[in-house]
Amino acid sequence: MNFAPFDSVDQLEDALSDPTPGVVETCGRLQGDVILLGVAGKMGPTLARMIQRASVEAGVERRVIGVSRFSDGDMEARLQTQGIETIRCDLLDEAQVAKLPDAPNVVYMPAMKFGATGQESLTWAMNTHLPSIACKRYRDSRIVAFSTGNVYGLTSVEEGGSVETDRPDPVGEYAMSCLGRERMFEHFSRTLEIPVSIIRLNYACEPRYGVLVDIAQKVWNNEPIDVSMGFFNIIWQGDANAMTIQSFDQAATPPWFINITGPERLSIRDTALQFGELLDRDVTLTGEETETALLSDSSRALKLFGEPRVGVDALMNWIADWIRRGGESLGKPTKFESRDGKF
């Protein structure tokens, strides 16, 4: 792919939705339509568009349907211009969900993270109750459901990150509710025989949001950066999109789990200093690294889907260029520094 900086949001989203050969093959094999629940989040729009583009490239005619409340004024229209059908729906309203069209392939994306502290009941409703609504409605479908690496809790930096067979040890109500989401999918996968793939993502990144963006913006604005978390993982959102779509092939009963992130264990300290050089800014660091961090081992994903197309250096250069030129931000910090699970 082209590694030149992005001149516009349209160019960026073209890159984020560019299907890999593996995605085209998967979309060629999938039978029937695809519906994406909670499509209007950070990843949903480009994920939906990648499915649409890959389906066209594979010569498959299908409906790609995005479902959301669409609180962002122009998101719905943008999706429609890209060949994606849209339906407005409050997914917590079972009567509305019952009216959604059938589809043999479901991408489940609704979640609540930011603002979870202080809205714990809504967080549990979104993250733990809503999956049961979706499973009962789409009991005859194949489901790829998003989760998070937060379900593992903090792990030893020296051990290299949590693997899919590790016992979850979530910290805080947000992470506990995400484990609840997984348990609901597991329950209905077993009792209703729904094939499910569960995506433990940690973290997707592009020039408008992500851990790298959070660090770069602090460097650009001369704000101190807390290095207590020490280390983190990231993956280019376009690669996360591609791996997610290919996970349809692995859906199983009981659910199949996959960590999706990049192969590198990145240092917050080193990353901040590198952004200081890229952005020509002095860097202020606070705190000291600890022996544990939120880290995931992506070996299974890399073995199945191959190495990410976009490496860390290219992504950092894109982000630095984007910030220097005043590019759009989604305004959704990851709060990666949080060690107590409060978001």
Image (cartoon, rainbow, N blue to C red):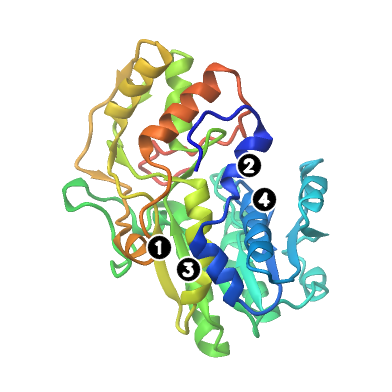
Q: Which residue is mark 1?
A: 305
Q: Residue at x 69, y 50 (%)?
A: 40
Q: Which residue is mark 2?
A: 13
- Amino acid carrying label 4: it is Pro
Query: What kind of element bears circle 2?
Result: helix
* Residue 224 in sight from this viewpoint: no
For the residue labelled by badge 1, is the local secondary structure a helix, a strand or a loop? helix
Residue type (three-letter) at the residue carrying disc 1 = Phe
CA gap, disc 3 to disc 1? Answer: 16 Å
Three-letter code, disc 2? Glu
Q: Report the residue at 51% width, 61% height from top.
A: 21
**Disc 4 marks which residue?**
45
Query: Tag 2 or tag 1, which sits nearer the N-term?
Result: 2
Picture coordinates of residue 213 (x, y %)?
48, 31
How would you rate the neighbour count of disc 3 (Cα within 10 Å): few for under 14, some for 14-19, many for 20 or more? Answer: many
Secondary structure under tag 4 reads helix
Tell me which residue sits at (16%, 48%) in the image.
158
Q: Are dots 4 and 1 in contact, CB under 8 Å?
A: no
Dot 3 and dot 4 residues touching (CB under 8 Å): no
Q: Determine crowd level at label 1: few under 14, some 14-19, many 20+ residues with C-alpha closer than 10 A.
A: some
CA distance separating discs 3 and 4: 19 Å
Instruction: Of the two numbered discs 3 and 4 on the same chain, state the one appearing first in sequence.
Output: 4
Q: Quadrant of residue 257?
A: bottom left
Q: Which residue is mark 3?
A: 198
Q: Nearer the viewer, residue 7 or 210?
A: 7
Q: Which of the numbered marks, if any, corresponds to residue 75?
A: none
Q: In the figure, 213 relative to 21: above or below? A: above
Q: Position of residue 171 (x, y in %)?
A: 38, 53
Q: Earlier in the sequence, mark 4 or mark 2?
A: 2
Residue 86 at what x, y percent from top left? Answer: 80, 58
Earlier sequence position, callout 3 versus callout 1? 3
Q: Give the vertical position of 125 relative to 204 (above or below).
A: below
